[in-house]
Amino acid sequence: MPLFILSILLQIALVVHIVRTGRNTTWIWIVVMLPLAGSVAYFLLEVLPDLMKSATGRSVSRKLSKSTDPVKDLKEAISDYSVTDTIERSMNLAGEFLKKEMYPEARSLYEKCLHEMQENDPALMHGLAQAEFGLEKYEAACETLESLIKLNPEFKNPDAHLLYAQVQEALGNEDAAMHEFEVLHRYYPGPEASYRYALLCKKLGNAELAAEIFTGIVGNAKNASKQYSAIHRRWLRLAESELKN
């Protein structure tokens, strides 16, 4: 049986369970709109506690505990959202979806928030653009970010700026991307923007400038605090690897 059909049958079964057991009806929306995450969350937060009353349930719970620890924050966000659908809890849940790279679920929730709550909210639009980028919907992400700036000209966010530069590169607008990365290189808090700028320079044939930037990233880290090195470990190691190569 195709996986899609199994997913639909599971959703129907869970919706029936929600109705018959008198659960909060918000769970219906979560299960229907967020098939994978919603179904898993409903089982862990609503069904599993009932199963734990039995010895078998307690055994299942113990076996699941280790594997579910990595999604603890996500479960808590879904639990909070299932109690009260507030803008704050919706944004928190959507943010957790982004962290787990659950881009379809994040996009769905951000779109819901924008349509029903805050149509032009810059934080929500930024989140939606992140989800669209993760789904490789680069043109949509570009349109969202450009609308964000048009509707919120006072909004200044380095991460949104970095995302816009990445979108331009993904769309093949390399001149525009170079311009944005060059600006980010001068002010972005952390080495990620500089690293991406150097990679683009290398890609476009300017190996000398790329090496200069990579060297600067590594050199700055040597004079920075241990906390800085720990937070940005990924980008520092990548820069070091580029220099070795």
Image (tube, rainbow, N blue to C red):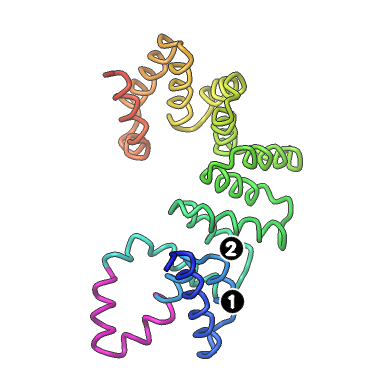
Residue position for label 1: 26
Task: Locate the N terminus by quadrant.
Answer: bottom left
Whether residue 113 appears in magenta in the rendering, the answer is no
Which residues are drawn in magenta?
Answer: 44-65
**Circle 2 — which element?**
helix
Q: Amino acid at mark 1?
A: Thr
- Camera-near label (2 vs 1) is 1
State which quadrant residue 56 falls in.
Answer: bottom left
Residue carrying label 2: 90
> Looking at the picture, does residue 152 appear above or below residue 40?
above
Q: What is the quadrant of the C terminus in the image?
A: top left
Q: Where is residue 7? Give x, y as percent.
A: 47, 69
Of the image marks 2 and 1, the number of the one nearer the N terminus: 1
Estimate the spatial distance between the alpha carbons at disc 2 and disc 1, rounded to whole Å.
Answer: 12 Å
* Residue type marked 2: Ser
Residue drawn at (28%, 77%), measured in percent from left and top? 61
Q: Residue at x 33, y 66 (%)?
A: 68
Give the answer, above or below, for where 73 lies relative to 103.
Answer: below
